[in-house]
Image: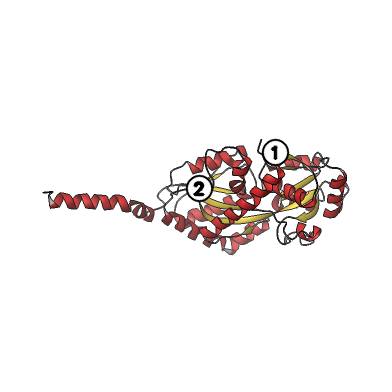
Amino acid sequence: MLNRRKLGLALAATAGVATWPSVWAQDYPRKTIKMIIPATTGSSDVIARALAPRLAAALGQSVVIEQMPGAGTNIGNNHVAKAAPDGYTLLINGLPLVTNLALYNQLPYNPMTDLVPIIELAEVTNVVVVHPDLGVNNLKELVQLAKSKPGQLNYGSPGAGSSGHLAGELLGLKTGTQMEHFPYKGNSQAMVDLLRGELQIGFVNLPLALPQVKANKLKALAVTGQKRSRLLPNVPTVAEALSLPDYEITAWFGILAPAKTPATVVQLLNREVDKILKDPEMVDKIQAAGADLIGGSSATFEARMKKDALRLTDVIRQAGTKAE
């Protein structure tokens, strides 16, 4: 007969193993949290650097940012997907998470199953801009010019699957125009070439485009979101300018963690970040940079990811686009 004392100890040990994630999560965080940004510069970096010190103060632990660019954000994405699911390695990324499956023939991770959404941070509209030497004054004129010169007009973006790239592809599909896309490794060189006139058109994140538009170095024709930007109130949306009610491309950014991260950790991070996103000082800072804060539940963020995965995968397939 099994000794009752030994049986009790065995049951206690089993219970301890079964409940350790929730017990451990109650003690979270106990060390520095690392936020991975899989790009060099851009809106996600601005948002992350505004968020990190506020989150550190809320959690009582350091929050550091590490840039890990390359391969259409896949290097950083894969790093986080393969990290320990303990809440200490987080990812800040956006649209490439839901477009890379369509763009790449094979990925070492699945962005829809190997990462768990925590919270949507912000969204940023793109601005359709042209070099002044192109000689067009509105989006209708640009479309007319593109139709008269199939494949002769070009635009650049930070890479295949970026919001800038997809905005251009969607415009081409909706208007029956052909424009040559040149993928860059980031925003910086694409902007330099656009300002030089080597690129004629840009579908550029508002924070990056705004200073150049105000300096009259680029001409803003339309914004790609569902509504006009409060920073460019006289610039119409693409939908308004071309009577295309179903045209909309918006860059968004959110925080994700490796799959199997304890639900209590996900809930804690969601709650604390959501509070920060509602802080008036944070709102003013991010809006001044050209973005709109979002927040909300993990489920809401996951729903947006799934919706854009279906919608934008269709755009990529119609355009016949593949990452190089």
Q: Nearer the viewer, mark 1 or mark 2?
A: 2
What is the total number of numbered labels drawn onto the structure image?
Answer: 2
Measured as percent of width and height from the top left, residue 270 is found at 49, 58
The correct choice, above or below, for 91 with respect to 70 in the image is below
Please state which of residues 85 and 268 is positioned toward the viewer in this rendering. Answer: 85
Question: Residue 15 has which mark?
Answer: none
Quadrant occupied by the C terminus: top right
In this rendering, position of residue 187 left or right of residue 19: right
What residue would you read off at disc 2?
113
Residue type at mark 1 is Tyr
Residue type at mark 2 is Thr
The answer to whether residue 182 shows anywhere in this view is yes
* Residue projecting furthest to the left: 1
The answer to whether residue 70 shows anywhere in this view is no
Quadrant of the rendered structure where residue 196 is?
Answer: top right
Colour option used = secondary structure
Disc 1 + disc 2, Cβ < 8 Å: no
Q: Residues within 10 Å of mark 1 (few under 14, many from 20)?
A: some
Q: Residue at x 66, y 59 (%)?
A: 287
Q: Earlier in the sequence, mark 1 or mark 2?
A: 2
Please state which of residues 99 and 216 is positioned toward the viewer in this rendering. Answer: 99
Dot 1 falls on a residue whose secondary structure is loop
What residue would you read off at disc 1?
184
| CA separation in Å, label 1 and label 2 | 28 Å
Measured as percent of width and height from the top left, residue 78 is found at 52, 40
Q: Residues within 10 Å of mark 2 (few under 14, many from 20)?
A: few
Please state which of residues 60 and 261 is positioned toward the viewer in this rendering. Answer: 261
Measured as percent of width and height from the top left, residue 59 is found at 45, 55
Dot 2 falls on a residue whose secondary structure is loop
In this rendering, position of residue 82 left or right of residue 47: left
